[in-house]
Image (spheres, helix red, strand yellow):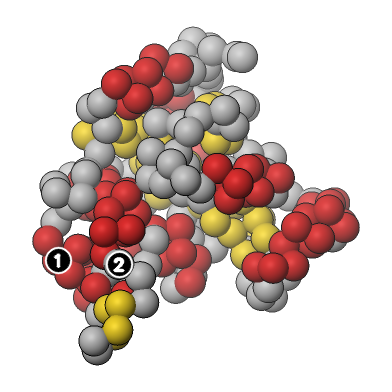
């Protein structure tokens, strides 16, 4: 594994923030980080802003509970963590800001920040554009053709050709771009998981290829410890 804590030419041009829980697992993850970063304390369900928790109650429709809120605690804590990080960037007017999760691993040198003008994923999972059930086949049979068609490092997401998931690393060249998402969250009538909310509302529409960061494949999810097969499936489509 390459250690990017030294000799990363453009590192000082970026402000990197990493979300991590202050737990044994979180501390072990921080020990594995191979890049310089500022640690931001992640939210738990209890420390997530109340208005965000309230907006996840759309799972209860009338007297019918579509999915118990207790099953959303990890997802809500993750959402709160990203919201707090984006709000910090907006409130403190921080440009060239990268948000990562503590299971991110840097795999390539950071490029000259001048190439970025829009919020950009620095690593992601990509899927069939419309059919989750067909994603495994799509990844095996069609994803490579899509990637081979890309002829630049900054790819605009064509939602008719693929969709993305995963928020382990993304960049805001300008702080106002983070503010726009904060305002969306503040005003949204309800919310979904952060990596559904952002693509569903087309709030981050570019990705860097090849990926600058990837999600570590061997780390257990702290959001849902029962979702091993789901995350294993995700890793097949990692950029």
Q: Name the residue under label 2.
A: 68
The residue depicted at 20 percent of the width and 63 percent of the height is 52
Q: Mark 1 points at which residue?
A: 51
Image spot of residue 34 (x, y percent): 48, 18
Query: Residue at coordinates 27% horizontally, 54% vertically from top-left?
Result: 73
Above or below, comparing residue 173 to residue 199 in the picture = above
Q: The residue tagged with tag 1: helix, strand or loop?
A: helix
- Left or right: 76 in relation to 118: left
Above or below, 18 against 133 in this view is: above
Q: In the rendered image, is residue 13 in sight?
A: yes
| Labels 2 and 1: the sequence-earlier one | 1
* Of labels 2 and 1, the one closer to you: 2
Q: Is mark 2 on a helix, strand or loop?
A: loop
Q: Within the image, what quadrant is residue 186 found in?
A: bottom left
Tell me the quarter of the image containing the N terminus: top right
Kindly identify the residue that appears in the image at 39 percent across and 58 percent down.
Answer: 194
């Amino acid at each position: 594994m390459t250690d990017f804590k030294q000799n990363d030419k453009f590192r000082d041009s970026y402000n990197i923030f990493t979300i991590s829980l202050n737990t044994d697992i979180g501390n072990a993850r921080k020990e594995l980080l191979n890049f310089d970063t500022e640690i931001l304390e992640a939210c738990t369900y209890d420390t997530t802003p109340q208005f965000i928790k309230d907006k996840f109650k759309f799972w209860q429709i009338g007297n019918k509970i579509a999915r118990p809120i207790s099953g959303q605690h990890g997802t809500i804590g993750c959402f709160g963590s990203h919201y707090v990080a984006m709000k910090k960037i907006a409130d403190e007017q921080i440009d060239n800001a990268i948000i990562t999760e503590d299971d991110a691993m840097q795999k390539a040198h950071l490029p000259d920040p001048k190439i970025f003008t829009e919020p950009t994923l620095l690593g992601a999972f990509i899927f069939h554009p419309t059919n989750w059930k067909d994603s495994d086949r799509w990844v095996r049979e069609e994803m490579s053709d899509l990637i081979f068609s890309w002829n630049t490092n900054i790819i605009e997401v064509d939602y008719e050709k693929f969709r993305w998931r995963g928020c382990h690393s993304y960049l805001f060249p300008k702080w106002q771009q983070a503010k726009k998402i904060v305002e969306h969250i503040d005003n949204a009538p309800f919310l979904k998981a952060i990596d559904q909310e952002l693509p569903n509302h087309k709030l981050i529409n570019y990705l860097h290829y090849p990926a600058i960061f990837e999600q570590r494949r061997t780390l257990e999810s702290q959001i849902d410890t029962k979702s091993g097969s789901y995350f294993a499936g995700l890793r097949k489509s990692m950029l």
